[in-house]
Amino acid sequence: MYSIVICGDSDERILTKTIAGTCMRYGGVFVSDGKNIYETGEGTEFLILCADSESEISCGGILVVGSGIGGGYPVIKNKEIITIADTGDAERLSFLAGHEGVVIGCSMSHCDTVSLSCSTDCRIVSLRRELTTLDGDIIEPCEIAVRCSEDIPVYPLLASSCVLALCGVPYENGYDIYSDPT
């Protein structure tokens, strides 16, 4: 089972809904989003937990930092956790610079590890650097076609794609990115 902690999601929970909805396409999901607790599918593959911005995080897995982080940041006690973040905010960059573990930047910047290279007719996620999955496999730089509705914002789309890649979900046939309405 892959542990995914989402910290600093907005009130609309777009980031959580997109990651949960996407993961549901690739295995059973157990979600505790701060308002609801639910499970989908048989055999839970993904554990998704939402934490507030001042949480202390001592587990491994993946930490996804949202834009609703506000003034506080989580205290990361386990440097083995892989952090995914939108690097478009100077204050967030300052927080990430102090983190000893792996940080994966996801934005429209050509400097980030995960970016969107095409968003017209189809969306193409560009993996610009080598990634090591949670299981220790290496993913070489590549482009991943994603199928999704146009109303999914860029960062939730990139973060969801990155989560799937880190969890070892094969990307050769692209990814289906969906938002879960619950």
Image (cartoon, helix red, strand yellow):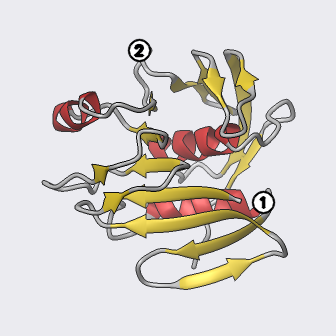
Q: Residues within 10 Å of mark 2 (few under 14, many from 20)?
A: few
Residue in front for this viewpoint, 36 or 98: 98
Residue in front for this viewpoint, 147 or 150: 147
Provide residue 52's location: percent of width, then percent of height.
Answer: 30, 66
Q: Is residue 51 left or right of residue 169?
A: left
Asked which quadrant contains residue 1, the reply is: bottom right
Residue placed at 57% from the left, 16% from the top?
128
Residue placed at 55% from the left, 56% from the top?
4
Residue 8 in view, yes or no: no
Q: Amino acid at mark 2?
A: Cys
Distance, label 1 to label 2, CA atoms, is 30 Å
Q: Amino acid at mark 1?
A: Arg
Vertical relation: 57 (above or below) 123: below
The residue at which mark 2 appears reads as 111
Q: Residues within 10 Å of mark 1 (few under 14, many from 20)?
A: some
The residue at which mark 1 appears reads as 25
Q: Is residue 31 left or right of residue 42?
A: left
Provide residue 32's location: percent of width, then percent of height.
Answer: 51, 76
